[in-house]
Amino acid sequence: MSSADKRRQERVPIDLWIEAELNGELYFQRASNLSVGGAFFAQTIPLPLGTRVDLKFEIPGDPVEIRCKGEIVTAKDLGMGVSFVDLKSGDRARIEMLISKVQAQARPKVKTGDAHRSVKPKK
């Protein structure tokens, strides 16, 4: 998958802790955005590109843990992008539902009466 294909996936801003394990060592990474294809870990020293890690995290409001492999695909300054590898279809669907929920909350709310109210012109 090219980097352009990866960027087509809808990303949402999020504040989520993801546990990453590498060679028996645990790292708690703060994800600043999330898509069904991966996450961006902010404020961390990046691992080398291509590094594989074991990931574990919970979606807010959903106590069932998601576990998958991750591969470091971007690294810059104090952050890195991780691509989800071998994500189960059920976990993917749960991430998609979270993304939809975050997007719905971000949309401006329109009052029902305001959309159809007509304004009389001044004379």
Image (cartoon, rainbow, N blue to C red):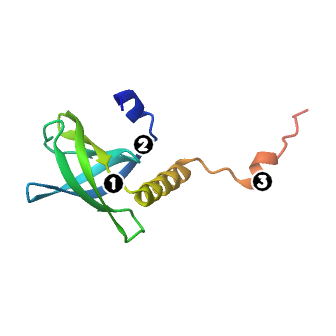
Residues 104 and 85: in front is 85
Q: CA distance from mark 3 to mark 1?
A: 34 Å
Q: Are the residues flagged by discs 1 and 2 in contact, CB closer than 8 Å?
A: no
Q: Position of residue 121 (x, y in %)?
A: 87, 35
Quadrant containing the N terminus is: top left
Q: SS for tag 1?
A: strand
Q: Which residue matches tag 2?
A: 11
The residue depicted at 29 percent of the width and 56 percent of the height is 68
- For discs 2 and 3, the disc positioned in front in the rendered view: 2
Q: Quadrant of residue 3?
A: top left
| 120 w.r.t. 84: above or below | above
Q: Position of residue 106 (x, y in %)?
A: 52, 49
10 Å neighbourhood of mark 2: few (<14), some, or many (≥20)? some
Q: Which residue matches tag 3?
A: 113
Report whether 94 appears left or right of 120: left
Residue that sits furthest to the right in the current view: 123
Report whether 23 appears left or right of 83: left
Q: CA distance from mark 1 to mark 2?
A: 13 Å
Q: Compare marks 3 and 1 and give the one earlier in the sequence.
A: 1
